[in-house]
């Protein structure tokens, strides 16, 4: 009897998904659907927050007041994205505190891309253009994901990511209109960020362990390889337009497929970075742990004030 009921619940759940009806926090959902969402949304939240570090590194060194204001606004937007996404994770029954502790203890992942250093000002261009560009490609699809709170968070996030991509491309365009040294700096940033940006979309479809089930649940609307291809197709003409060369000798337009063919991704590098051995993994986590420790007094003061007010109200 119990099994029958569960079967019926699962059947109704899948029927809702197939009819594109959003799943909301209080609806019945299979345990693994909940677990998949907690993993994906919390990883996404951590990526937004850890992702503030490589660009935050350049706020004090921005070359003009305008560029500083733009970069500051962008980095603050990423903090906001992290907060919406932690809230969306909480609707699935986990606490924000535990989720963040898992990150600090190295138990969970965040996007591989944020483990690469930002060495020059041109990296602010490459990150905005390529990293936010890749993020949008993935996140526009997630506006139609099956879990309501995640889908709704994505709508606002995508609007902001679009501004982020534009400001990055503007930096690259300005550098490509500049001196030989500035052009060289822009090309060097593209050389270093191109392949890691392609890795953001995750392992190839053949190696991706979650894609098949996540597509059935409409958590994901496109596969990793489909989104990676769409990103390459959209980005290569942008590079060419401003005189940049994509660092891939195998890159070629394939008339028959109507897509660019591109070279092999170094998956060993990807798994090394995901496994904690990228150039900046250690310092990124240390920076997050330090930020939490440094902010402890603020949380204590806020809680003490709230408790005092409660006591006064009860008097
Ligand atoms: N890095 O079976 P799949 C941004 C993990 S936001 C690290 O294919 P799935 C904005 C994966 O989690 C960037 N780990 O997994 C910004 C799984 O882990 P498990 C973040 C990765 O979930 C810009 C395992 O490998 N965006 O950048 C990566 O079906 C500038 C097997 O992989 C999102 O998180 C990776 N690149 O597909 C902020 C979007 N790829 O189970 C600041 C939402 C895969 O072993 C500055 N997430 N893994 O623990 C997704 O769409 C999906 O989770 C994928 C992966 C597509 C990332």
Image (cartoon, grey):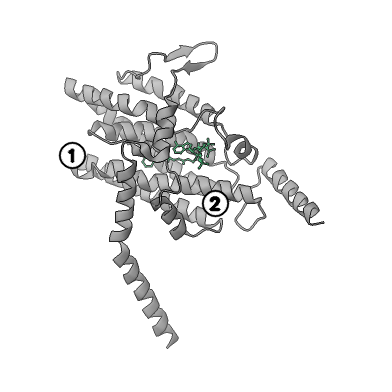
Q: Which residue is found at the position 36% from the left and 46% from the top?
A: 50
**Which quadrant, please, contains the C terminus?**
bottom left
Task: Name the residue located 25 percent from the left edge and 31 percent from the top edge.
Answer: 122
Q: Quadrant of residue 266?
A: top left
The residue sitting at the bottom extreme is: 315
Q: Secondary structure at mark 1?
A: loop
Question: For the residues marked 2 and 1, what is the alpha-carbon distance in whole angstroms?
Answer: 38 Å
Question: In the picture provided, is 172 more to the left or to the right than 271?
Answer: left
Give the residue pinned by disc 1: 64
Q: Position of residue 29 (x, y in %)?
A: 66, 52
Q: Quadrant of residue 66?
A: top left
Q: Is residue 256 above or below residue 147?
A: above
Residue 114 falls in which quadrant of the image? top left
- Give SS at disc 2: helix
Q: Could you tell me if residue 17 is visible in this image? A: yes
Task: Decide if residue 74 is in sight here.
Answer: no
Residue position for label 2: 149
**Residue at point 26%, 24% (across, down):** 188
Q: Determine whether label 2 and label 1 are within 8 Å by CB.
A: no
**Considering the image in quadrants, where does the N terminus appear?**
bottom right
* Percent x, y of residue 274: 42, 37
Image disc number at residue 45:
none
Q: Position of residue 107 (x, y in %)?
A: 45, 49
Q: Disc 2 vs disc 1: which is toward the camera?
A: 2
Question: How many marks do you count on the picture?
Answer: 2
**Residue lying at 47% horizontally and 51% vertically, measured from the top left:** 85
In the rendered view, would you say 231 is above or below 80? above
Q: Position of residue 161 (x, y in %)?
A: 40, 40
* Whether the residue under disc 2 has CB within 8 Å of ligand 1: no
């Amino acid at each position: 009897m119990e099994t029958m009921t569960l079967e019926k619940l699962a059947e109704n759940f899948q029927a809702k998904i197939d009819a594109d009806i959003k799943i909301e926090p209080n609806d019945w959902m299979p345990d693994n659907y909940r677990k998949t969402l907690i993993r994906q949304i919390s990883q996404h939240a951590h990526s937004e927050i850890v992702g503030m570090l490589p660009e935050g590194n350049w706020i004090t060194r921005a070359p003009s007041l305008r560029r500083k204001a733009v970069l500051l606004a962008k980095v603050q937007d990423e903090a906001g994205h992290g907060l919406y996404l932690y809230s969306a994770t909480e609707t699935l029954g986990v606490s924000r505190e535990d989720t963040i502790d898992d990150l600090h203890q190295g138990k969970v992942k965040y996007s591989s891309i944020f483990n690469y250093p930002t060495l020059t000002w041109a990296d602010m261009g490459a990150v905005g253009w390529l990293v936010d560009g890749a993020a949008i490609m993935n996140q526009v699809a997630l506006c139609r994901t099956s879990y309501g709170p995640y889908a709704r968070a994505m709508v606002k996030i995508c609007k902001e990511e679009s501004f982020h991509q534009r400001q990055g491309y503007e930096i690259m365009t300005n550098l490509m209109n500049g001196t030989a040294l500035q052009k060289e700096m822009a090309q060097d940033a593209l050389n270093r960020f191109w392949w890691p940006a392609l890795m953001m979309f995750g392992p190839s479809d053949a190696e991706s362990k979650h894609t098949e089930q996540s597509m059935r649940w409409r958590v994901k609307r496109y596969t990793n390889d489909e989104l990676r291809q769409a990103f390459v197709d959209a980005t290569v003409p942008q590079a060419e337009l401003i005189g940049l060369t994509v660092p891939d000798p195998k890159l070629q337009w394939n008339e028959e497929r109507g897509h660019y063919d591109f070279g092999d991704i170094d998956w060993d590098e990807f798994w090394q970075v995901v496994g904690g051995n990228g150039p900046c993994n250690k310092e990124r986590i240390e920076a997050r742990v330090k930020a939490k420790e440094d902010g402890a007094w603020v949380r204590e003061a806020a809680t003490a004030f709230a408790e005092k007010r409660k006591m006064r109200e009860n008097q």
